Image: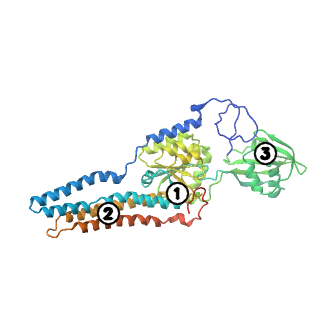
Amino acid sequence: MPVEKSPGDTLVGGTLNGSGAFTMKATALGQQTVLAQIAASVERAQLEKPPIQKLADRIASIFIPCILGVALLTGLVWTLLGHPQVGLQTAMSVLLIACPCALGLALPVAYAVGLGRASRLGILVRNPAAIERAAGLQAVVLDKTGTVTKARPQVVELHLEEGFEEPEFLRLAAALESRSEHPLAKAILERWGQPAPAVQEFKALSGQGVSGLVEGRTVRLGSPGLFKIDAEGDIRTRVYLEVEGQMAGWMALADPLRGDAVEAVNGLRRVYQTIILSGDRAEVVNSVAAQLGIIGHGGLLPEDKKKHIESMQRTGLRVAMVGDGMNDAPALAQADVSVALGWGSDLARKTADITLLHDDLHRLEQTFRLARAIHRTVRQGLAWAFLYNLLLIPVAAGILYPRLLSPALAAAAMALSSLSVVLNALRLNWFDSGPSSASQPGEVLAGNCS
């Protein structure tokens, strides 16, 4: 929503000027600007992240030398017992039965299938290591504007004085706003939805409103201050209309919640600690958070969002940040898992581990559920590989002597083990979208997810 500025106030580069002209003094250049500080903050946060080592690699680094030692020891023991041929056969069988194919396939196959399924759901994963972190999330931080709200002001209430009807009120207001540069003008014109009447003697009243002659009547439209009205207590933006010196009524404008926000956030807060961090006014953020049933913190600068996430992480929480704007970038980089919305800024998408392409907030919960499914599949594959080796390595080593496991059967058993791991991972292709499937699919904003 627009914020009024007065002489002496600080402006941020990239801010849109609604109406009128002003003289600005540059007090920060180059690396001192807000944009440069945001970029530096993103870089620092990314560098602080420790590299994620693959679980399978850590296990294999211990497992392979152990198997080589077991095979060598098996052959040596049987040879010392006077059965060199048995020693050779059992050593070969141990190596074949313990070939770390299933162990090596468990992680990459599950990730390959899972990420393929994610892309078909409109979930693009820029950093696969984030999937492992997403599986253990405990908290989700949401931006407000553009994430849970529409980021587009709309007329949410219309109050008319006696003697005035809605069509007349909106027609006169739209006539004035058709000549206005104010950001709220578009919302009023959209509410009217028809060609506006012509305006004569149009004047822009700097910082207060507009006036003009419409259909032969003098009409003024503006803020409470223009009419010396006290509108304190209403966190929305009120716009009043006066016709021929008589108050016609007022309309309230606000940035409303997205249609899917309440249901999507309810799904999140059943599993995770969910909060809102926003740069908007605290009273507005608190109002939005109350509608969603969560806690909100407003009036935050980009660096403040990052520090808030750092404080959560120091308490032991694994945190995901969801945002769409430039000022979300430092927090996205600091979070354990960062999710950008495909309709947001380029900087947010570049910083984030995961980008949602569909205009559907339900995809957020779906992303985290898919991450848990991938992680669970990896664990199942690793558990099966260990169980398989635990049971069959003693058999391959000759514990059932004189009945020995031939190298050919050992190779077949190894192939079946690998096949079982692959088939288990392929089940992710039929990952059930759960609660999200009940909602209507959103428009694909980018990419080809067919």
Name the element at disc 1: strand
Do the CB atoms of the residues marked 2 and 1 lie less than 8 Å apart?
no
The location of residue 344, given as percent across then percent down, is 60, 50
Give the amino acid type for the residue marked by disc 3 in the picture.
Ser
Labelled pair 1, 3 in contact (Cβ < 8 Å): no
| 314 left or right, relative to 200 | left
Q: Quadrant of residue 387?
A: bottom left
Instruction: Say which amino acid is labelled 1.
Output: Ile
Query: With 12 as the anchor, is 56 left or right in this view?
Result: left
Q: Secondary structure at mark 2?
A: helix
**Along the polypeptide, which appears first: circle 1 or circle 3?**
1
Return the residue at label 1: 123
Which SS class for mark 3? loop
Identify the residue position indicated by label 2 in the image.
384
Residue at the spot 49% in from the left edge and 51% down from the top edge: 126
Q: Position of residue 228 (x, y in %)?
A: 77, 41
User: Which one is earlier in the sequence, the residue at label 2 or at label 1?
Assistant: 1
Picture disc at residue 180: 3
Q: Residue 418, relative to residue 236: is it above or below? A: below
